[in-house]
Amino acid sequence: MKFILFHLLLTLLPFSLFAHNPLSARYELNQEDNHWTLNVNLSQSGLEQALLKQYSKESLNTKTTTQLKQLIIEYIKPRFVLKVNGEKITLKDGGLRLGNHQTDLKFILSDLPQNIKEATISIPAFKENKQHQTIFFHHLNGQAEHLVLSTNNDYQAIIIEAPKSKLSTYLLITLGALVFIALIYYLLAR
């Protein structure tokens, strides 16, 4: 019995720690009904650390709850850059719930195209907090996937890579063939 409890604890412990880890944020892109949403889960302490690098503690303490929520939204919105088929997707209306340990935000996004050929993400929010990482979940083109954005990838990644042009493939093959022929000609001429 102790063995089972020990393994259960080891299995569940990482999930309970994630919600309060000041070095992590979770962003999730979902399609709901006929629109796309972005859910953001932030550690309250990580959020405070980032805001304190831009505003004084006294300034933050004098803000009303409404003003503080607006500051958080103004911090998050420009630090979320999703491009689909070369077009920037914007965060529109949303809501915010302040918690003691975690702050949750939800935004409606501008329309995403039906046929997604390429998509990139950049979320530099909280990079001023050393060793911060953002986990980005998405459900694009029928695939669920998560990416870890950190200093290792400069908080950006390719979600869906654009298909390579057949012309560039043919040019590469032609160039390789020309080099091969030139090498054979050189070796035979010796």
Image (cartoon, rainbow, N blue to C red):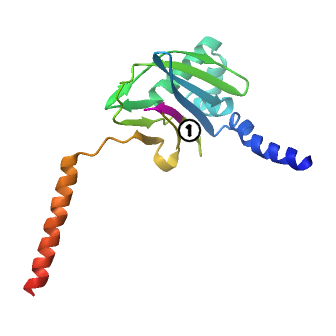
- Image point 69% across, 38% down: which residue? 18
Indicate the quadrant where residue 187 lies. Answer: bottom left
Question: At 78% across and 46% down in the image, what residue appears?
Answer: 10
Provide the secondary structure element on which disc 1 rests.
strand
Instruction: Work out whether 143 lies above or below 93.
Output: below
Q: Residue at x 13, y 66 (%)?
A: 178
Q: Is residue 64 visible?
A: no
Using the rendered image of the protein, determine whether residue 127 is visible from the camera's viewpoint: yes
Q: Residue at x 73, y 39 (%)?
A: 17
Q: On the picture, is 29 further left or further right than 41? A: left
In the rendered view, does 37 fall on the left or right side of 168?
right
Residue corresponding to mark 1: 134
Query: In the image, residue 152 lies at what x, y percent?
Result: 50, 50
List x then y, in percent, for residue 72.
Answer: 56, 22
Residue 47 rendering spot, x and y as whole percentages = 62, 30
Query: Where residue 94 sits in the image (x, y, percent)?
Result: 53, 15
The vertical placement of 58 against 125, above or below, is above
Whether 74 is among the magenta residues is: no
User: Does the magenta run of residues contain 140?
Assistant: yes
* Part of the protein shown in magenta: 137-142
Dominant secondary structure of the magenta stretch? strand
Does residue 169 appear to the left or right of 93 in the view shown?
left
Of all residues shown, which one is farthest toward the bottom? Answer: 190
Dot 1 amino acid type: Thr
Q: How many marks?
A: 1
Q: In which quarter of the image is the C terminus?
A: bottom left
Residue nearest the viewer, comparing 85 with 174: 174
Mark 1 Cα within 10 Å, few/some/many (few <14, many 20+)? many
Residue 168 shown left or right of residue 39 in the figure: left
Instruction: Find the residue positioned furthest to the right.
Output: 1
Rendered view: 163 above or below 60: below
Query: 174 or 110: nearer the eye?
Result: 174
